[in-house]
Image: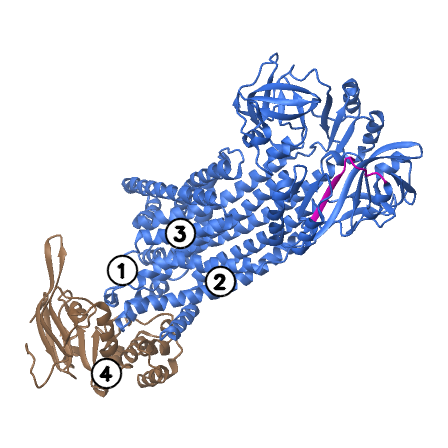
Chain colours: A brown, B blue
């Protein structure tokens, strides 16, 4: 496991002494402690561990969704822990895509509109064409006008994949992407995820407790009680 | 704006997905009803003002005992006003050896500027409206003239030295006054014939009336210009000054209309706050996701603000349109009751509806909306993360500020605004604490209750803050509705009391003391009830504590009017039962030298208990000390007096008697008999005035009823919207309970318990709030005696329990009727 960056091969994500604790009635509760991590561009990393090991916390800190109580996170060499929330939001818009366990599609929007959303947010005038192309790529060309309610779980997650890749993000964070799906559907979604990841040379950080899924990643990071194994 | 297109698309999508339905509905109701009421009230008010102007046959009338300077008329026409003129005097008519004192009125071209005359072409003909006076050479007369002088239509009638042909029988004139000139039968002639009558000589007792109509601004300018130039015998009349009884009815009606507008806005405001709260909560996830996808806080705020602005403008515009239609509908329904000439709807009232919509939306929706930008992006991973509630001062401050401005705009009365907002707020604060306490007290009892009650009440206690605000919101709604209803009833009762079915419609003046017992006997024999017979001595107030009374008065005040003419002075052993002493003491029967003064006049002239007043009666002087000040209702049509003396003070002066009585239409002949039997007595006819007044009151009552139904309907619709806005949590829990095996019946019962208790608590609070507001409204603003409305207080909890219980029960049918899986999936 690497703990420092190499000058010739700059990291896309790097953490130094990253920690997160919250106050509790029995004193400070350490959710994550002293995580040092370097991830290179194009790598695929699986973060594995049991429930409560700190996987989701690590993901939220890496993606700038939350702020650490100690240490720093660098994305493309920029320390996101010193940025304010709006700075981090801009960074997310520019570099990061997400896939969530609960899909997180907006219920009122159609499949196409859900995929268009991140492009629209960044002011891309070509949102619709790009979204159509990607939905076609994930096999949902005929489902463009369907709302999430009208889609199965697998279809919803494929829409979420299309939404995540439509901005061609440098980094994709996936939080238990198959957690809500049966194994066959899950496998199909994962195949798609890895295909798209390869096509776009995206850096993938995948949180899972599924060993077979983790095994498909280039590297595995184990967490237990908030510490890296 | 870069994101404007995106905001619009999001809005469209939200609209399509039904997220906005509730909010739009609440706003639509608010704007539609506010616009309807604003338009309706505005039109009605302007119509009524015009109609009231008919009473004067003009918008503004200058009355005096001499012709006005020509420059004044030029000034009026220069300002764009249209003038007309009437000259009134009495003259003895002599035909067929019969003699009759008649009230002659010579009218100019253009008369009546407002309203119309009603006439018959023959004695048996049908009544028709006519918008001008008689042609030169002709006269229109009242039937009494024909019968008293044995004349018929077509006969000649000589006024002074001028013979005129009677061409019509006059049945109605808009500007008939309840004063000296109204009691004799009327002859209307053309002004061009006036010189030929030779009646008007220098020193003749003649009254000149100059009517003007035109734009409000021109009228105001003219009045302002005119006032300083008036001599003591000249007076400006307009509806508010000249007809106090009508003025106060109009004023109260206007205030009521304003109040119903406030009621709807208040209810809608509560509903919009709830709907916006729900909208916000349902958009936490979207905001979190948007932030996750890179939206900055300010952008999120802008995104939603733009959406709400567009939504507000669209909805308000549609609401205005609906309001316009609603108002047309109201006028259509009320057509038979309303004057034929309706004022046009004013665009300003529509604009006001629109502005109201935007203001309510932003005032009530902005604070919850502000929470959206505070949603942590981490919520995409942890759904339980909710942003902090908006700051209390922001939520309440903005809503209160906007409400205050709106209430003020409607009532145009800071006192009323402060009363409503102040009492409302402090009650809310106290009541909020009270409800919180009540809920806390309930908690220890829960384990002792049956499962159904326990679950129902737990629904309330689980989120006690939300429950408190719901109870308060419902109680505001209920209080507002009850307020609207009670004020309407009391207002109408008050009017009815003022003018009972058999309110006196005739006054008999100048009854000679020797004939008074016979006169009373004649009335009694004809089965006519009369009020008491008051002895009257005509006298003028000249000094207050040896100071000339002229020094005490301001121009155009009631006091000025009172000191420039002789007052009817009376005496009585005790003041009349419907007068009440506001300061000082009553006298005992044998104390001479005391006087009781009417309160408004006393205030006007600065008269206090213990002051010495000096009067001139004929050539003599008489003094009396003020024993008390008393208030009375001027618009009861009973004899009322500024000055009542203790017995023995005026007894030595020549006196006549005065009484009032009610004569049904069928027995009007009696009047002629009385006039023949008692030629010295004058009969003052207030029947026409009374009828006009009653018609206006009836129309006002009908309009008020309709507005009330409208407010009630709006209230109930919004009430339901409010219940619906709080359902998500309950639906979720209900679905969960059903998954765990709860039966539908049982769930229904828990909902009934929960909403029933919610409604009943709201009803109790509503009773307290409405009574507090009523007290302030009545005692400070509307000047109606306040009596606690026990009926409202007793029924409100029941009404609250039923309405909220049923609305809640109906709203949560989804929990009970749909499969729990579908509910859970959807949420």
Q: Which mark is residue B386?
A: 1
The residues tagged by marks 1 and 4 sit, at their Cα atoms, a distance apart of: 35 Å
On the rendered structure, is B534 left or right of B703?
right
Q: Residue furthest bottom?
A: A199
- The quarter holding residue A7 reads bottom left
Discs 3, 2 touching: Cβ within 8 Å: no
Query: Which chain letter matches label 1?
Result: B
Secondary structure character of the magenta stretch overall: loop
Dot 2 alpha-carbon crowd within 10 angstroms: few under 14, some 14 to 19, many 20 or more:
many
The residues tagged by marks 3 and 2 sit, at their Cα atoms, a distance apart of: 20 Å
| Residue beneath disc 2 | B316
The residues tagged by marks 1 and 3 sit, at their Cα atoms, a distance apart of: 28 Å
| Closer to viewer: mark 1 or mark 2 | 2
On the rendered structure, is B736 left or right of B797?
left
| Closer to viewer: mark 3 or mark 2 | 3
Dot 3 alpha-carbon crowd within 10 angstroms: few under 14, some 14 to 19, many 20 or more:
few
| Closer to viewer: mark 1 or mark 3 | 3
Bounds of the magenta span?
B198-211
* Residue at image location 36% in from the left, 51% down from the top: B396
Q: Position of residue B222 (x, y in %)?
A: 63, 50
Dot 4 alpha-carbon crowd within 10 angstroms: few under 14, some 14 to 19, many 20 or more:
few
Query: Which chain letter matches label 2?
Result: B
SS at mark 1 in the image = loop
SS at mark 4 in the image = helix
Q: Is residue B748 visible?
A: yes
Q: Position of residue A32 (x, y in %)?
A: 11, 66
Counting residues from the N terminus, which is met first, the one under dot 1 or under dot 3?
A: 1
Same subunit, labels 3 and 4: the answer reads no
Same subunit, labels 3 and 2: the answer reads yes
Q: Position of residue A79 (x, y in %)?
A: 14, 73
Query: Which chain letter matches label 4?
Result: A
Counting residues from the N terminus, which is met first, the one under dot 3 or under dot 2?
A: 2
């Amino acid at each position: 496991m690497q703990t420092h960056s190499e000058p010739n091969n700059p990291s896309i994500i790097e953490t130094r002494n990253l920690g997160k604790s919250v106050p509790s009635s029995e004193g400070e509760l350490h959710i994550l402690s002293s995580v040092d991590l370097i991830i290179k561009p194009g790598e695929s990393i699986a973060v594995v561990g049991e429930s409560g090991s700190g996987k989701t916390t690590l993901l939220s800190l890496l993606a700038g969704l939350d702020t650490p109580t100690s240490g720093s996170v660098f994305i493309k060499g920029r320390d996101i822990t010193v940025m304010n929330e709006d700075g981090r939001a801009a960074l997310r818009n520019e570099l990061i895509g997400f896939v969530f366990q609960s899909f997180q599609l907006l219920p009122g929007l159609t499949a196409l509109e859900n995929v268009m959303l991140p492009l629209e947010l960044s002011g891309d005038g070509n949102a619709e064409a790009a979204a159509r192309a990607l939905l076609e790529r994930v096999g949902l060309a005929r489902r463009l006008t369907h709302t999430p309610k009208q889609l199965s779980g697998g279809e919803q997650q494929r829409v979420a994949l299309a939404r995540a890749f439509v901005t061609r993000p440098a980094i994709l964070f996936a939080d238990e992407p198959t957690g809500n799906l049966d194994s066959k559907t899950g496998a199909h979604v994962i195949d798609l995820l890895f295909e798209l990841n390869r096509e776009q040379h995206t850096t993938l950080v995948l949180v899972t407790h599924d060993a077979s899924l983790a095994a498909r990643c280039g590297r595995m990071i184990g967490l237990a009680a908030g510490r890296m194994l | 704006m870069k994101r404007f297109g995106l905001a619009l698309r999001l809005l469209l999508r939200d609209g399509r997905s039904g997220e906005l339905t509730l909010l739009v509905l609440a706003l639509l109701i608010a704007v539609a009803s506010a616009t309807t009421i604003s338009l309706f009230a505005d039109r009605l008010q302007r119509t009524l003002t015009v109609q009231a102007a008919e009473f004067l046959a003009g918008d503004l009338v200058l009355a005096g005992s001499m012709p006005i300077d020509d420059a004044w008329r030029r000034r009026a026409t220069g300002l764009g006003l249209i003038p007309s003129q009437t000259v009134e005097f009495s003259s003895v008519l002599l035909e067929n050896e019969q003699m009759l004192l008649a009230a002659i009125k010579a009218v100019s071209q253009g008369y009546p500027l407002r309203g119309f005359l009603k006439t018959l072409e023959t004695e048996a003909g049908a009544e028709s409206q006519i918008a001008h006076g008689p042609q030169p050479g002709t006269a229109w007369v009242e039937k009494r003239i024909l019968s008293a002088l044995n004349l018929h239509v077509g006969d000649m009638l000589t006024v002074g030295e001028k013979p005129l042909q009677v061409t019509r029988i006059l049945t109605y004139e808009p500007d008939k006054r309840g004063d000296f000139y109204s009691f004799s039968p009327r002859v209307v002639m053309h002004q061009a014939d006036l010189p030929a009558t030779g009646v008007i000589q220098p020193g003749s007792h003649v009254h000149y009336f100059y009517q003007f109509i035109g734009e409000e601004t021109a009228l105001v300018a003219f009045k302002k210009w005119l006032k300083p130039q008036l001599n003591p015998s000249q007076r400006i009349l307009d509806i508010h000054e000249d007809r106090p009884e009508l003025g106060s009815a109009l004023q109260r009606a206007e205030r009521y209309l304003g109040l119903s507008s406030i009621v709807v806005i208040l209810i809608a405001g509560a509903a919009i706050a709830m709907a916006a709260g729900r909208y916000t909560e349902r958009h936490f996830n979207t905001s979190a996701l948007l932030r996750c996808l890179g939206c900055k806080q300010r952008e999120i705020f802008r995104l939603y603000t733009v959406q709400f602005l567009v939504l507000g403008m669209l909805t308000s515009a549609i609401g205005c349109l609906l309001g316009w239609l609603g108002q047309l509908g109201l006028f259509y329904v009320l057509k038979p009751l309303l004057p034929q000439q309706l004022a046009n709807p004013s665009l300003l009232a529509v604009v006001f509806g629109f502005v109201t919509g935007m203001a309510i939306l932003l005032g009530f929706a902005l604070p919850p909306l502000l929470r959206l930008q505070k949603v942590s992006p981490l919520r995409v991973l942890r759904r339980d993360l909710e942003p902090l509630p908006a700051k209390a001062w922001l939520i309440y401050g903005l809503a209160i500020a906007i409400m205050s401005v709106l209430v003020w705009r409607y009532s145009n009365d800071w006192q009323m605004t402060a009363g409503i907002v102040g009492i409302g707020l402090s009650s809310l604060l106290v009541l909020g604490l009270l409800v919180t306490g009540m809920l806390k007290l309930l908690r220890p009892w829960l384990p002792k209750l049956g499962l159904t009650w326990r679950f129902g009440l737990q629904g309330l206690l689980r989120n006690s803050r939300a429950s408190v605000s719901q109870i308060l919101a419902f109680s505001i709604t209920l209080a507002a509705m009850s307020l609207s209803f009670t004020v309407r009833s009391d207002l109408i009762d008050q009017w009815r009391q003022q003018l009972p079915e058999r309110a006196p419609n005739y006054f008999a003046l100048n009854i000679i003391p020797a004939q008074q017992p016979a006169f009373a006997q004649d009335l009694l024999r004809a089965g006519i009830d009369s009020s008491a017979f008051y002895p009257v001595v005509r006298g003028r107030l000249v000094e207050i504590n040896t100071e000339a009374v002229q020094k005490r008065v301001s121009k155009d005040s009631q006091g000025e009017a009172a000191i420039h003419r002789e007052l009817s002075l009376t005496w009585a052993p005790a003041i009349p039962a419907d007068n009440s002493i506001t300061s000082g003491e009553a006298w005992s029967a044998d104390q001479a030298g005391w006087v009781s003064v009417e309160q408004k006049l006393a205030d006007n002239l600065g008269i206090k208990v213990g002051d010495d007043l000096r009067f001139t009666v004929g050539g003599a002087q008489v003094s009396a000390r003020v024993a008390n000040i008393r208030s009375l209702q001027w618009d009861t049509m009973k004899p009322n007096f500024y000055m009542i003396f203790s017995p023995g003070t005026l007894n030595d002066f020549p006196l006549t008697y005065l009484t009032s009585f009610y004569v049904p239409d069928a027995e009007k002949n009696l009047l002629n008999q009385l006039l023949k039997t008692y030629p010295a007595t004058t009969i003052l006819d207030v029947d026409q005035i009374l009828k006009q007044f009653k018609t206006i009151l009836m129309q006002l009552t009908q309009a008020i009823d309709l507005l009330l139904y409208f407010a009630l309907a709006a209230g109930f619709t919004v009430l339901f919207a409010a219940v619906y806005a709080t359902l998500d949590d309950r639906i979720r829990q209900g679905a969960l309970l059903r998954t765990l095996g709860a039966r539908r019946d049982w769930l229904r019962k828990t909902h009934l318990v929960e909403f029933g208790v919610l409604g009943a608590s709201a009803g109790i609070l509503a009773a307290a709030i409405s009574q507090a507001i009523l007290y302030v409204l009545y005692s400070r603003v509307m000047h109606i005696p306040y009596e606690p409305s026990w009926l409202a207080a007793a029924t409100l909890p029941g009404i609250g329990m039923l309405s909220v219980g049923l609305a809640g029960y109906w709203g949560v049918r989804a929990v009970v009727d749909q499969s729990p899986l579908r509910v859970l999936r959807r949420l």
